[in-house]
Amino acid sequence: MYTTTDTVNRATQAPTKEAFVTIEGVSKVYPTPRGPYTVLKDVNLNINEGEFICVIGHSGCGKSTLLNMVSGFSSPTDGIVKVNGKQITKPGPDRMVVFQNYA
Ligand SMILES: Nc1ncnc2c1ncn2[C@@H]1O[C@H](COP(=O)(O)OP(=O)(O)OP(=O)(O)O)[C@@H](O)[C@H]1O
Ligand SMILES: [Mg+2]
């Protein structure tokens, strides 16, 4: 059985190069007037170039929070998001977003 953190070729079991998008140990905690609010905790995901991914979950589970960290509009509280081996620190022309709401 494989998990999203596997970095082996599923057919050959051989180690592969780093995935195109890597989300490593990512957590996101928002400060709120009622104290810290943990939305994501230790999220790990590898996406290879050309893969088509759907993130599914109930409203408020943190899908947009995760995508905002891949697009670079927001930073993880913990962990690292990398695209093509480069840590994401800000938005860039190599990524695009169709916003959920009028923006
Ligand atoms: N800036 C913020 N400060 C505090 N809480 C926030 C902030 N942004 C989002 N949240 C909260 O984080 C949680 C996750 O929000 P997010 O927008 O990522 O959910 P979602 O999975 O995209 O939901 P939906 O399916 O409704 O789009 C929600 O409870 C939301 O209220
Ligand atoms: Mg959303």
Image: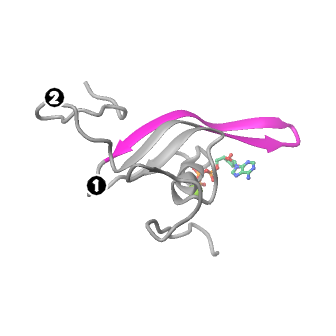
Crowdedness of circle 1 by 10 Å Cα count: few (<14), some, many (20+)? few
Could you tell whether 2 is left or right of 42 in the image?
Answer: left
Q: Which residues are magenta?
A: 27-47
Occupied quadrant, residue 46: top left
Q: Is residue 88 within the magenta segment?
A: no
Q: Position of residue 39 (x, y in %)?
A: 65, 39
Please give the residue where the numbered disc 2 appears in the rendered image. 13
Q: Position of residue 72 (x, y in %)?
A: 57, 58
Q: Compute the Cα span from label 2 to label 1.
A: 18 Å
SS assignment at label 2: loop
Query: Of label 2 and label 1, which has the lower sequence position?
Result: 2
Q: Is mark 1 within 8 Å of ligand 2?
A: no
Q: Residue at coordinates 22% horizontally, 32% vertically from top-left?
A: 15
Q: Residue at coordinates 23% horizontally, 38% vertically from top-left?
A: 16
In the rendered view of the protein, which quadrant contains the N terminus? top left
Q: Residue at coordinates 26% horizontally, 41% vertically from top-left?
A: 17
Task: Check if mark 2's residue and mark 1's residue have beta carbons within 8 Å.
Answer: no
Q: Is residue 37 within the magenta segment?
A: yes
Residue type marked 2: Gln
- Quarter of the picture for ligand 2? bottom right
Q: Position of residue 5 (x, y in %)?
A: 37, 32
Could you tell whether 28 is left or right of 58 in the image?
Answer: right
Determine the residue located farthest toward the left in the rendered image: 12
Name the colour scheme: one colour
Whether 34 is drawn above or below 73: the answer is above
Q: Main secondary structure of the magenta part?
A: strand
Whether 83 is drawn above or below 100: the answer is above
Please give the residue where the numbered disc 1 appears in the rendered image. 49
